Image (cartoon, rainbow, N blue to C red):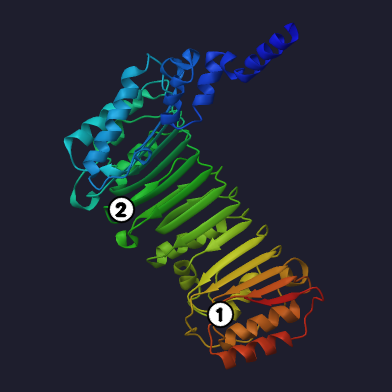
Amino acid sequence: MEDTKRGKADEEENADRISNLPDFVLSHILSFLPIKTAVSTSLLSPRWRHIWKKHLSVLDFSDDFFQPNDDRLELFKTLAVFVNGVFTLRKPCEVRKMRLSCTHSLVDHKVCTYSVNTWVHSVIGPHLKELDLTLYSNDDDDGGYCFEPPISLSACINIVSLSLNGAVYFNLKRAKAIRLPSLKKLQLHIGYVEVSPMNALLSGCPNLETLDLCFYAEDSGGIIRVPPSLKWLKIIINNSDAGASLEIDVPVLEYLCIANITITDANNLQNVVEASVDVFPSSAASAFTFLKLLSALTGIKHLVLSRSTTKWLLGGPTDLHFPEFRHLLHLELILPWFNSYSLLSLLQTCHLLQVLIIQNDKDQSPLPICATQPSVPSCLVSHLASIELKGYRGFPDELLFAEYVLQKGLVLKTMIIVDISVDPNKKFDTLRRLSNVPRASANCQLTFD
């Protein structure tokens, strides 16, 4: 009998072993749960009743938690009741991280404006480490709801991550007043903004390491200047006609992705190992700085060049002005047209290249076909193991290039030809011709996808 009682007691103890953990451990566990789930744990037992109220320092709110409603304002009011209830029931406890996502409920209404501002102000302080706001309104394009980050954000002297997405607006006066000395990661995916307040905000983040910008530039000709402390940089200007440009001098940068922008100056990029470049020189001067950008990428290992970039570089059969890429292993090119001479000129500068991906945008080259290079690129006989030709159209220049690399590629393992968009008879002739080409590498597998 005693053994039976002891066994039941052990079972009960094991069954609720989690409840015996210290409060700070339980609150840490709750921080990984959706806020509605964390709040519902108060119903488990008296032990859990006040855990989230006293100790939960991570708040994650989203209008996805609630039943969809065609009336956006009513959905927001439902969210507001829940969020206000959480803030009311919580005991005084520092909020370390807050995420607020309103993608289906925001409208231009004083209830929305007042509520979001109140919630953000409630968590601002030196204790806050991460703030993530995703605020999308159904009337973004009509001057509707818009969130302006408050000057009091500077009180978050220990914040390390800030993410603002959607209907967010910065004016110059507020941006100048915001100082975030500990910020390491900044993401801004917003609407229209002038470059000057953007620069003002960035100047107040002297220790920034990760910067992700995606916005519409309101002013033409604005120059974006980024902090020299960056290790990861992505800038996408949504309106390519804005004429925004970038001045970049970041000696510790490791990753670079830029789109729809011109370059005014580029220095100290020797530590960049991966880059995706979508720029278009608008003048001879900006073309020079673009070449300066490529020359500065001395340590690059993975490089993607977009259509707008290669269109300028392919201005003539001998105009592909690439510097020496002595460490480049992976190269992806999106071409406006195919130019085998320029491609082979490029390969002459990529001595260690292992992977080459070419995406042809299905235009026939306006340039005459030129003779092949007098010397075989060194990567073809030593390192280039994989080539993929996407958007293959069967143009003579494409066929000559494919034949050349099959005949000269001593270490080539795979050559994949994708999207052979030609008539069936021409496609069959292409497949047969390439299949019969003598291959320099006995291990080369030719695949048509």
Q: Residue at x 66, y 81 (%)?
A: 402
The answer to whether residue 165 is left or right of residue 436 is left
- Residue 199 drawn above or below residue 440: above
Q: Secondary structure at mark 2?
A: strand
- The residue at the point 50 percent across, 38 percent down is 209
User: Could you tell me if residue 440 is visible in this image?
Assistant: yes
Q: Is residue 147 visible?
A: no
Q: Amino acid at mark 1?
A: Asn
Q: Position of residue 163 (x, y in %)?
A: 40, 39
Q: Horizontal placement of 292 versus 218: left or right?
A: right
The residue to which callout 1 is attached is 339
Q: Earlier in the sequence, mark 2 or mark 1?
A: 2
Q: Is residue 91 above or below residue 419?
A: above
Q: CA distance from mark 2 to mark 1?
A: 34 Å
Give me the residue at 66% from left, 86% from top: 431
Image height of 368 relative to 69, above or below: below
